[in-house]
Amino acid sequence: AIWMTQSPSLLSASTGDRVTISCRMSQGISSYLAWYQQKPGKAPELLIYAASTLQSGVPSRFSGSGSGTDFTLTISCLQSEDFATYYCQQYYSFPWTFGQGTKVEIK
Amino acid sequence: QVQLQESGPGLVKPSQTLSLTCTVSGGSISSGSYYWSWIRQPAGKGLEWIGRIYTSGSTNYNPSLKSRVTISVDTSKNQFSLKLSSVTAADTAVYYCAREDSYSSGWYYYWGQGTLVTVSS
């Protein structure tokens, strides 16, 4: 299985901040990576797929970059509705795996 | 708009088999070329991919669970199901059904709301 290291696990930030979340793979996965946002009691919501393609309807303040083993999710200007937990997911090889999650909390 | 809804017992005894069903609405489960999946999340923890099934019946399972998991599809009922045998407390989690966005895309746009299954005597 491909192991994923997502960091940080907790990120304290203020509205308006630019935040970045990292996801590192144990082996190269080309661009087979997705990012999700999850709020308490809800299912994850797809933000980005193919490492950098923004899902339709997702605000443009979200962006993804990277390929191979190192990936980044950036929120350019944090809004109140962005306080949530974020997960990366690789779909390069079975089993699909998810990062441990990054909780973005209000500073 | 495709919608998914999980259903099944919320409490399962240790050593028994967990059985969940995902009902698909807003479209036929056999139309298009999609994989249908199960993903779980223990309380306060991350997501674990359990496995997926194509409408032809072809499956992929997580090796960590493969010996205990069966995913099946019933196109006549527009449902797919999960069976997990010999459960322990470690199988307590919210279970989600989900659909990959397009044929074997790997990423998930459509999710059910999730159903909590507790393993306890």
Image (cartoon, rainbow, N blue to C red):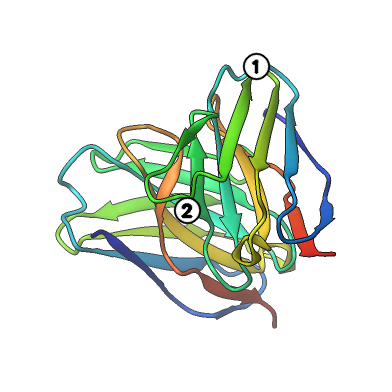
Looking at the image, which residue is at 78% across and 63% down? A105
Q: Is residue A75 left or right of residue B52?
A: right
In what quadrant of the picture does the C terminus of chain B appear?
bottom right
Query: Could you tell me which secondary element the residue under label 2 belongs to?
Result: strand
Residue B99, position in %: x, y? 37, 49
Residue tagged 2: B38
Q: Is residue B75 left or right of residue A35?
A: left
Say which of B26 and A2 sits in front. B26
Q: Amino acid at mark 1?
A: Gly
Identify the subunit bearing mark 2: B
* Quadrant hosting residue A37: bottom right
Looking at the image, which residue is at 50% across and 44% down? A60
Regarding residue B66, the answer to whether it shows in the image is no
Regarding residue A13, the answer to whether it shows in the image is yes
Query: Could you tell me which secondary element the residue under label 1 belongs to?
Result: loop
In what quadrant of the picture does the N terminus of chain B appear?
bottom left
Q: Amino acid at mark 2?
A: Trp
Q: Is residue A74 left or right of residue B37?
A: right
Query: Relative to A49, does residue B89 appear above or below in the rendering?
Result: below
Residue tagged 1: A68
Residue B49, position in %: x, y? 56, 46
Looking at the image, which residue is at 74% across and 40% down? A20
Residue A11, position in %: x, y? 82, 53
